[in-house]
Each structure stands twice: as C-alpha cells, then as structure tokens.
C-alpha cells in the first residue's frame, strides 16, 4: 500500500512542474488511522505553502493516528513557511513515509525530529520515481549547478540542417509544440552564438505560459544588436569572455573549449536558475557533453534523411571508441509523425 499512496504523491508533486522554481516539486497524501485518503496537497509555487500543509489542512482531525506520504523529507526550518515536521507532529500523524531525503542542509532534519518524537519513519519508498520527478531541483541542490537538458531535432541519420545550412521544419508542428511545452518547464533556454548567427532563433515559449531567461554563450560578443534573442519578449543574458565589453552580459573565464562551462553554470546557480534547456548548436552541445554537464537528452527524430549537412552533435571529445559517451534510454514517445527519445547518462559500471 505504501507504494500506492506514494505513487499518488508523486503524481500530485508533478502538478507543480514548471512553477515552483527555485523550490522543489513536492506532493503529499495523508491517510487516516483506518487507511483512507483524507488529505492531498502539492507545492504549487515558491514561497507558497508546502505540500504537507495543504494535505494536513484537508485532513483536519482525520490525520490523527494516520500516515503521511511525502515525496521529499519534510522540512524542519522556519523558512517562508513554518517547519512541516512540527505541523505533522501537531496533527498527530503517527507514521511518515518519505521517498527522498532532503539534500538542502538548511531545511533537512524533519525525519530526525519526527523520529525523536516517536513517529514511525520510513524513507526510500518509490525513490527512483520521485527523484525523476524532482530531477531539476535535486541536481541543482546536490551539485550546486542547474540541471541541463540538451534538446535536438534531427533526421533519422542525425542531421539538423542540410548542407546549404537550411534547417527549418525538419520535425513536425506537433514536435515543435512539444518543444515549447518543455521550454516552459525550464528556467533558462541556452544557445551558442553560432546558432544565433545561423538561425536567429527567438528562444521564447509560445504560447507564453512562462518566460525562461535566454542565455547566449558568446565568448567573443558576436551577437548582433538586432538579433531576435535581444528583443524584449523575455530576459536575455549574454555569457561573454572576461575581456568582452557588452551590456547585459555576464563575464565568464575561458576554458579549454570556449567559455568555462562549470563557471557559467555556477553563475546561473547564483541567479537561482534551477534548470537549463540547451538548444544548440552542435558545438556547444559537444562542449557540454565533453564536460559531463548534460543530465538529460531529448531528441526529436523525424522519419527523414539528409545524408549530408550539419550533424546534431559536434566534437564531444571522443577520440577512440573507448571514450564513447554511453547513455541509456528513459523513454520513447511518438509525437505526431516523429519520435521523442529521452535518455540519461548510464550509471557508472560496478565491478
Ligand atoms: C517547498 N515545498 O512542499 C516542501 C519543501 O523556501 P521555503 O522556506 O519554502 O523552503 C524551501 C525548502 O523547504 C526547500 O528547499 C526544501 O528543502 C524544503 N521542502 N519546499 O518549497 C514543499 N516540502
Ligand atoms: Zn515544509
């Protein structure tokens, strides 16, 4: 039964997807002493009530003697709201089941406090599912850098543009709409200056349900003043080399291949950017992959062939087959006539 109620809590948590940044998505289910669901809640927006609070409100007196299922360890701090550990104690909950311990040192400790007060505590229930739903925030908190999703659209033979550079509409309108939906779930949309010069993309969410910041990686400051990314539709940040005078920009030291990407991501972390949607081009994607800074790949593949032209991925630092970037598929979904393939780095092999 624990799995069943936790699955529901993970589902509730996902309703906050895209609106809680820089906070996590969290879901909570309360069952009564008899085992009936008496309260449900999720975290909807940073600064708003935590998931546990909404669920406890709904449950009222029926929470007494019951169980709370929470996708993330309840907080134990006086932040923008009071500690959920105390709220659970006050409501008389006797058992607390958690999927993922809280990696945020400021807020963690709820489980210990609950245990110290005689509450039965369990962790790790449906952990993988809950981790996946909260992947952006967990990576942001554990690694002190945003979660990076690299997206590309290509033909089945992995080409993103024809040899004359034309690239529009390789994938279907359905796939493009799906890209906009995913953009809206990230805090930043990133592209290299090569893509800006070649395609002049807008990098906004349409319809405008969110306004992720547009980040252009432009070490030499080559973004033209009339580029679409510099219109007022969403905020834009140009990441330039330390020696480049450019307004509205952030100066980043150089690394072995263009700008120092860990330094760039640290800078974005300072700005509370939890997630980055990396959209090109092949050179920047190669640098990110080489640096081990891609957490998820979303590939839209059209049933079409080009045979020549720009590859989806440039040099990623692989010189021999032993250096291959080995990933694993997460899921494959048809989107209109195309396929959307999601993959993540394979876990290190245990010997
Ligand atoms: C949430 N929502 O449902 C839970 C959270 O900014 P504050 O004061 O609201 O605290 C945020 C921290 O609280 C967050 O980083 C996480 O560690 C913990 N739990 N946060 O935003 C919730 N349960
Ligand atoms: Zn809380």
Image: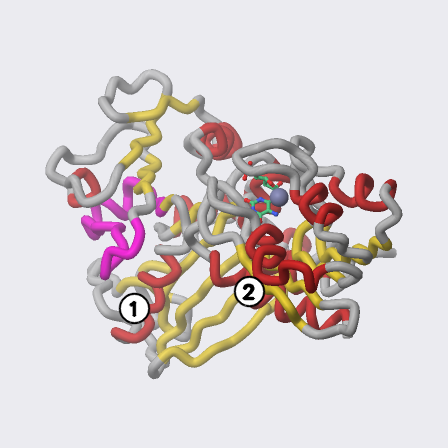
- Residue 322 placement, left or right of 212: right
Residue 105 visible in the snapshot: yes
x, y percent for residue 260: 48, 29
Q: CA distance from mark 1 to mark 2?
A: 24 Å
Up/down of 303 relative to 230, above or below: below
Residue picked out by circle 2 = 12
Residue farthest bottom in this picture: 337
Q: Quadrant of residue 130?
A: bottom right
Badge number at residue 177:
1
Residue 287 visible in the snapshot: no
At numbered mark 2, what does the secondary structure look like: helix, strand or loop?
helix
Magenta extent? 189-210
* Residue name at image x 62 percent, y 70 percent: 8
Badge number at residue 185:
none
* Residue name at image x 70 percent, y 74 percent: 36
Residue farthest left in this picture: 226
Q: Quadrant of the N terminus?
A: bottom right
Rendering quadrant holding ligand 2 = top right
Q: Quadrant of the C terminus?
A: bottom right
x, y percent for residue 176: 29, 68
Magenta span includes 36: no
Nearer-the-camera pick, 118 or 272: 118
Nearer-the-camera pick, 193 or 43: 43
């Amino acid at each position: 039964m624990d799995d069943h109620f936790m699955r529901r809590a993970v589902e509730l948590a996902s309703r906050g997807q895209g609106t809680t940044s820089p906070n996590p998505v969290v879901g909570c289910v309360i069952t009564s002493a008899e085992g009936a669901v008496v309260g449900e809640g999720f975290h909807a927006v940073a600064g708003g009530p935590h998931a546990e609070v909404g669920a406890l409100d709904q449950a009222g007196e029926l929470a007494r003697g019951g169980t709370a299922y929470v996708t993330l360890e309840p907080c134990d701090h006086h932040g923008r709201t009071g500690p959920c550990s105390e709220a659970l104690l006050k409501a008389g909950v006797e058992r607390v089941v958690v999927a993922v311990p809280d990696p945020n040192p400021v807020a963690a400790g709820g489980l210990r406090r609950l245990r110290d007060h005689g509450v039965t505590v369990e962790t790790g229930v449906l952990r993988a599912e809950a981790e996946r739903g909260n992947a952006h925030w967990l990576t942001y908190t554990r690694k002190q850098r945003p979660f990076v999703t690299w997206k590309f659209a290509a033909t089945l033979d992995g080409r993103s543009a024809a040899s004359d550079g034309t690239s529009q509409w390789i994938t279907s309108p359905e796939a493009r709409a799906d890209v906009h939906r995913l953009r809206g779930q990230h805090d930043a949309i990133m592209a290299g200056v090569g893509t800006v010069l070649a395609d002049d993309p807008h990098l906004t969410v349409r319809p405008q349900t969110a306004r992720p910041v547009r980040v252009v990686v432009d070490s030499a400051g080559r973004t033209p003043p009339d580029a679409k990314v510099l219109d007022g539709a969403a905020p834009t940040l140009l990441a330039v080399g330390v020696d480049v005078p450019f307004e509205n920009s952030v100066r980043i030291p150089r690394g072995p291949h263009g700008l120092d990407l860990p330094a760039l991501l640290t800078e974005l972390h300072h700005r509370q950017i939890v997630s980055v949607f990396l959209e090109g081009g092949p050179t920047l994607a190669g640098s990110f992959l080489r640096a081990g800074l891609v957490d998820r790949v979303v590939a839209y593949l059209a049933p079409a062939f080009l045979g020549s032209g720009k590859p989806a991925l440039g040099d990623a630092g692989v010189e021999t087959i032993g250096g291959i970037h080995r990933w694993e598929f997460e899921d494959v979904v048809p989107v209109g006539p195309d396929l959307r393939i999601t993959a993540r780095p394979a876990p290190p092999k245990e010997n």
